[in-house]
Amino acid sequence: RGGGVATRAGGVVGVSHLDRESGPREKTGPYPRPLATAAVAAAESEGTGPPLSGFWNGDFANSLPGSPDFGWSLRGAASVAAGRAVLDEGAVFFSGFRQTLVIPAGADTIRFTLAGTEFFDDASAPPDAFEVALLDAATFQSLLPTCVGLAGTDAVLNVQADGRVFASPAVSVPGLAHSGDLPALAQPWTIDIGIAGVAPGTEATLYFDLLGFGSAASRVRLDDVFVTGIEPPTAASDQ
């Protein structure tokens, strides 16, 4: 993922989006960037004015990458199916969604639904993990405090294959008492990333990444990504 480096500490996996030697995470290093990603990235800024939800296509009603208002840039085995973002483990080290937004005035949180995580246990490789990061679009530095108890990552949320969840103090996860614990509630989770302290007008890039190290079998599903505190979006019904 973007030239980042995987780290392990007691079986915990995290990745920094900024490798100090190779540059920002968009540089893939030895992992080839899928050709389709370039076209999707070109469509990221397409639209007809600022989206009311803060994000284009936050309800994933548009499933056609590269089309107007699709909004998201994809990497690896990422797709939209049945009104949800789907991250599958594939040949590329990371599968991911990303989108850059301008933090709107009055914004309180970035809210999204983690609809489900399915991790495959491969004893021959480090465990897979799911991460969320919010980086300054120009500097690639995290705009928020990173996960408590997890070194070597700039993520604000990290979900391990064994169910443990590491979170920034700015992130609220249902049923999670302390970073590094197992949440008391089953998925799906509605997760809030607090951005009230980020200056309005800041260009921020939101990343959703599945870190795959072993057999290509893990999957993460996401839904309903939007900014709270501004005009509420109209969510499409997922059938």
Image (spheres, rainbow, N blue to C red):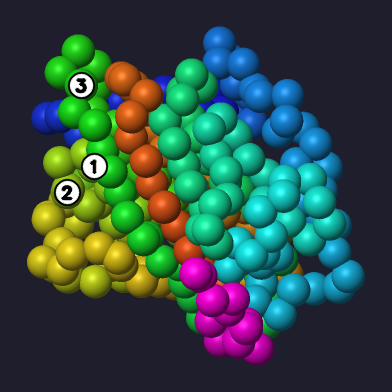
Tell whether label 1 touches label 3 (CB within 8 Å). no
* Amino acid type indicated by mark 2: Arg
Q: CA distance from mark 1 to mark 2?
A: 5 Å
* Amino acid type indicated by mark 1: Gln
Residue 78 visible here: yes
Q: Please provide the residue range marked out in magenta.
A: 227-239
Q: Residues within 10 Å of mark 3 (few under 14, many from 20)?
A: some
**Which residue is the site of mark 2?**
164
* Amino acid type indicated by mark 3: Asp
At 24% from the left edge and 32% from the top edge, which residue is drawn?
120
Q: Which mark is residue 160?
A: 1
Q: Report helix, strand or loop for mark 2.
A: loop
Q: Earlier in the sequence, mark 3 or mark 2?
A: 3
Q: Is residue 14 left or right of residue 78?
A: left
Please identify the residue farthest to the right as the structure is shown. Answer: 48
Q: Position of residue 13 (x, y in %)?
A: 27, 32
Q: Position of residue 38 (x, y in %)?
A: 77, 32
Q: Position of residue 70 (x, y in %)?
A: 73, 56
Identify whether 128 is placed above or below 118. above
Q: Report helix, strand or loop for mark 1.
A: strand
At 36% from the left edge and 61% from the top edge, which residue is drawn?
115
Q: Which mark is residue 122?
A: 3
Q: Is residue 42 left or right of residue 236?
A: right
In this view, the residue in front, 41 or 146, is: 41
